Each structure stands twice: as C-alpha cells, then as structure tokens.
Amino acid sequence: MTLSRRGVLAVGGAVGALAVTAAQAGPAAASPGRGPGRPGVRTGFERLAADGYRLLAGQKAGVVTNPTGVTSDVRHIVDVMHPDDRVELTAVFGPEHGFRGTAQAGGSEGRYDDPATGLPVHDTYLKSGQALADVFTASGVDTVVFDIQDAGSRFYTYIWTLYDCMEAAALAGKRFVVLDRPNPVAGRAASGPVLDPAFATFVGRREIAQAHGMTVAELALLFAGEFLTERPVELEVVRMSGWRRSDFFDATGLPWVPPSPNMPTPQTALVYPGTCLFEGTNLSEGRGTTRPFELLGAEGIDRRWAAAANALELPGVTFREAYFTPSFSKFQGRTAGGVQLHVHDRESFDPVRTGIGLLVTAKRTWSGFAWRADHWIDKLTGSTLVRTMIDAGADTDEVVGAWEADLAAFRKVRREYLLYR
C-alpha cells in the first residue's frame, strides 16, 4: 500500500470555529472527558444548526442521508431543515436502502418527490463518477451535505457512498460538507486486512483496514488527502463535540436508528466487521433472524462448532450452540445449527480475529463448508489471502499475522486524519 501523508486541523468545541478543511494542518484536539452531568454527544448536524447554518449561507444545499440522519430527539434533519428560513435545502440524495429506508439490501427507492416535504429525492445507489456528477449537476445544488450513521466496517457501503459522492462533487464542481457522527464501535485502533486495490468493489473502494476505527468525517479527510488528489474536492467537515475515541455508542446519549434493515442494534455493529465474512460462505450470517450477524450456521452443523470456537479462547467473547430458522435469505424456513456470539468484554473483543477464528473452525468441524462460488469472501477481505490460507490449513494466528505489515502502514497514515483523542 502506497499512501501519502497530510495533516488536518481538528477544531475545538466552539461553534464559531465550525468547519475543518482538507487543506488545514494542526494537531488533534481532545474531546472533554465524560463525567457527572456532562451532556451527551452533539453531532455535526446539531452543531451546524446551532450555528444558524452559517456554513451553508447563500448556498442551495442537497443532503445525502437516510433514516439515521436524525437529531437527538429523533427528528429527521431534512424535516428540520426544510421549513427553516436560515438554510435553502433544495434536494435530497438517497443511498442504498433509500432516503426514508423502504428498500432491503441491494435496493433503493429511485427518483421521487418526498411526500413529507415535496423535495426531489435523487437516487445515488450504484452510481459513481460522471454518472453521479450528472445527478448533482441536474439537481441544481451548490453544496452537497453528507449525514449518515456508519457502522465502522470497510464493507459497510455507506462510506463508499461518501467516497463516490466526494469524487462526483469534484467532477461537478460542487462544494462538499460532511456532518460527523460517532463510530458506534468506538474509534479504536484499526484492525483486519487492508484492501488490495485489485479487489476494489462497492464493498471496498480503496486501501483501508477492514475495521477502520474512524468516523465518517475522518474518513472523508483521509479520502481527500490520500485518494482523491487528482481532482481535489472542496471539502469541509463539521466535527462532533463531546465524543471520545473510547466511546461506544451507548456512551453517546444519541438514539440508535438502524442504518440498514440488518443492523438493528449497536451490538450488531460490534460483531459485524468479523461475522459479515460469512456472507462469503454457504453458511447463514443470521439474516432473517432477530440477531443478524450474531447467529451463524447451516443445516447439518451441531455442537462441535461451538466447542471448537470456544477452545480458541478468543478474548471478550463466548460461543453458544444455537439453532434458528431464518424467515428469509439462506436456509429460509429451515432449521440451521450453529453458534451465537456473546460478547462479554467489548474492550478486549476483536471482531476480525473472531471472524477468522470462526471461519477456521467452521471449515474444520463441518464437512459441508464451502466458499461462495463467486469468491465474495475475497471482495469482503480485500484479497485472496484469507480464503487461500484457510484452505491450506492455516490457523487463526497465522491468518491474522499475514496482514500485519499492511495494517501497520495503514495505521500510520490513519493517525494523520484523526479528529478526536
């Protein structure tokens, strides 16, 4: 991985000093410590609104958002901005699952007028480059604003909606503003394999770690500073106040809105960077159950898998023998046997190592184990390394050790773009 390094400025808590640009340089500012009586996290949107939308003054604004774009009292930001005379909101851009969230995985809402506000809603899903730039141009906006809650994993597609929209905004000559929200699984050190650009897809456009440990604003700054350099985007980000890198979502005081139908809780997001790898196998990843990505299994699996997984003594997690019947997706209406993850110490829990350990033990204990024929596992992990090493009989530590050099290089670059201590 070859990455350049650029510094960025992290502004402090004053609303007057609101935006961070990709060109500024300086040290990261500390967030205030959590203590008795301390208010919860204020998102980028709430800081923008409290400042009277001055950052958008004189601009026709369009917002890239979905159901997670809410205030602390769960009003949608579009419904808040639309009647406010201090801001001129003229368009909405919907990602996968749609602006109002009516579509399942792999779907969107298309082009329509929002019944609540009358605003035109444009579809960004599966659009990139000049095709997406044309959408921004046709919308007539001056500034594109991004406000979507991420889940913290490279293959969670909203960060690549962010990337594509930044690139398209540069092509269309539009200003781009990112309103920050917490990484729900904390901003811990990055972990997992770094994507090989030869495996770039919508579940991984560029060379970042599988669990990146960054917020969307930090990722936007990294994208601008490292990858979108040929045609720079006019980027500003509005950071949060009150968030620390050690904060999991339940420490923020913010409401959790599922960012997609199969991400119902912050607990789902905690395990997702590892257990989503089962999408690349013939096992169920728990879609169609009330515990997606916490329940894993297939017809024919029995107690031996849970026993083998527990024998690895992976930190922070225990595995329970479990049986479930998905209502849709793999094994719909049939009973699958497998495991349920129970995370008892999220500070020490490593979701990616756990996911690798589960793949290794599933293959060793169930003769029916198979990778998806399209090698989707390679797209999720970002190379052939995980699949080929497991097929060759490597154990968990050997697989994890194989990506450490690339991960160390990414961590070094990542530090330059962190806005919060």
Image (cartoon, grey):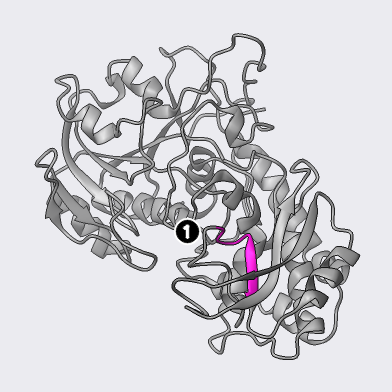
Q: Is residue 92 visible?
A: yes
Local SS, label 1? loop
Asked if residue 89 is positioned above or below residue 398 in the image, the reply reads above
Image coordinates for residue 388, horizontal then vertical, percent: 74, 84
In percent of the image, x 47 and y 38: which residue is there? 256
Q: Is residue 205 left or right of residue 277?
A: left
Is 294 in the magenta? yes
x and y, in percent, of residue 26 in the image: 60, 25
Up-down relation of residue 272 to residue 34 (above or below) = below
Residue 271 image point, x, y percent: 65, 55
> Which residue: 81% across, 65% down?
400
Viewport quadrant of the C terminus:
top right
Provide the residue span drawn in magenta. 291-297
Q: Residues within 10 Å of mark 1 (few under 14, many from 20)?
A: some
Q: Which residue is at a point 72% across and 46% down the rendered structure image? A: 412
Residue 184 falls left or right of residue 104? right
Q: Which residue is mark 1?
A: 262
The reply, left or right, for residue 317 in relation to residue 420 is right
Q: Amino acid at mark 1?
A: Asn
Quadrant location, the N terminus? bottom right
Q: Is residue 193 magenta?
A: no
Q: Is residue 370 above or below residue 42?
A: below
- Toward the top, the furthest residue is 37
Q: Quarter-wise, where is residue 198 in the image?
A: bottom right
Pick the front one: 109 or 49: 109
